[in-house]
């Protein structure tokens, strides 16, 4: 009986400790905050038919104390995990590691053996009359301009774009270290369009008893409204005006004031007001 017990314990111990998992390759050295990558692993020993292999990501210092699962596969044998993986919210860094973990039995594999970088593309643009410019400063950046319906504009692969149609929305897609991201959409403005937009804005009455009526005309919306006195001191500020027609009251004493309107394309419209 003692021999049988020993034999059973040996078999169980051999079963539990004979399983190993290790990563044979990771398809990328630089992980994008959004992107596809593939992890190949080797599984040795017997795993349950209901087993699940998980790929776990360390923190930026290589610690698995608070590891997160980034992909998985239901399997009992050697294979691959990979998917479109979103890592937004994690800090950028160059010390990440990946390991494989099994569920039945629970086995923690060694990490992939080398540091991985998590990279966030820098996508932004500045907008000026007749010109849009991507503001990335990395020399390896690749550019592709898009209409805001995200149709590619053939041949428009420079950092700046000046062939837009006034009033049409455009975006810039950039590729940095294999990672792709797309900017917000912005409206292309021709210089003569700004003059037309300025002429469409009305502010009054002027002079005023205090209440100022504003019609934004073709501007449509404002990012900021600033009111200054003649000393250049800021008297009032209004953010995010979404109504074409709106009013505000000059709360300060009678006198002359400068009104500055700034739209969402950073165009500035200046007016002078007199409060009686």
Image (cartoon, rainbow, N blue to C red):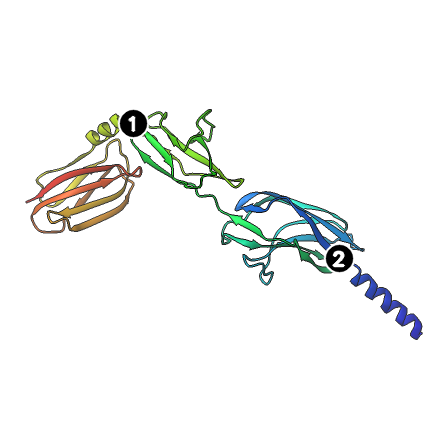
The residue identified by callout 2 is 20
Quarter of the picture containing the C terminus is top left
What is the number of the mark on residue 190? 1
Residue drawn 11% across the image and 41% down it: 273
SS at badge 1? loop
Foreground pick, 14 / 209: 14
Task: Give left or right: position of 179 versus 3.
Answer: left
> On screen, 67 above or below 220?
below
Foreground pick, 146 / 112: 112
Residue drawn 35% across the image and 25% down it: 165
Foreground pick, 178 / 264: 178
Of pointers 2 and 1, the one earlier in the residue sequence: 2
Foreground pick, 224 / 15: 15
Task: Give left or right: position of 10 versus 182.
Answer: right
Q: Residue furthest bottom?
A: 2
* Mark 2 vs 1: CB contact within 8 A: no
> In x, y percent, where is residue 200?
21, 30
Alpha carbons under labels 2 and 1: distance apart:
64 Å
Q: Residues within 10 Å of mark 2 (few under 14, many from 20)?
A: some
> In x, y percent, where is residue 248?
18, 45
> In x, y percent, where is residue 228?
15, 47
Please count the marks in the image.
2
> In x, y percent, where is residue 45?
80, 55
Residue drawn 41% across the image and 40% down it: 136
Q: Residue furthest front?
A: 139
């Amino acid at each position: 009986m003692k021999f049988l017990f020993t034999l059973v314990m040996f078999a169980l111990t051999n079963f539990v400790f004979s399983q190993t998992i290790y990563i044979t390759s990771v398809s990328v050295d630089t992980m994008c905050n959004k992107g596809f990558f593939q992890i190949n692993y080797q599984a040795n020993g017997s795993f349950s038919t209901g087993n699940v292999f998980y790929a776990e990501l360390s923190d930026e210092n290589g610690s698995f104390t608070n590891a997160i699962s980034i992909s998985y596969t239901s399997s009992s044998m050697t294979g691959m995990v990979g998917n479109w993986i979103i890592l937004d919210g994690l800090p950028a860094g160059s010390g990440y590691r990946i390991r494989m973990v099994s569920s039945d039995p629970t086995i923690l594999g060694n990490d992939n053996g080398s540091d991985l970088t998590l990279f966030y593309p820098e996508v932004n643009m500045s907008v000026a009359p007749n010109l849009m410019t991507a503001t990335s400063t990395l020399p390896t950046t690749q550019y592709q301009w898009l209409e805001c319906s995200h149709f590619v504009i053939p041949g428009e692969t420079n950092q700046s774009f000046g062939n837009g149609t006034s009033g049409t929305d455009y975006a810039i897609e950039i590729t940095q270290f294999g990672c792709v991201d797309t900017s917000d959409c912005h409206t292309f403005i021709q210089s003569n369009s700004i003059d037309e937009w300025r002429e469409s804005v009305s502010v009054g009455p002027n002079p005023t008893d205090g209440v100022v009526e504003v019609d934004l005309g073709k501007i449509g919306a404002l990012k900021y409204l600033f009111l200054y006195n003649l000393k250049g001191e800021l008297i009032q500020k209004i953010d995010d005006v979404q109504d074409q027609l709106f009013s505000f009251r000059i709360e300060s004493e009678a006198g002359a004031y400068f009104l500055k309107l700034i739209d969402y394309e950073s165009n500035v419209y200046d007016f002078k007001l007199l409060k009686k």
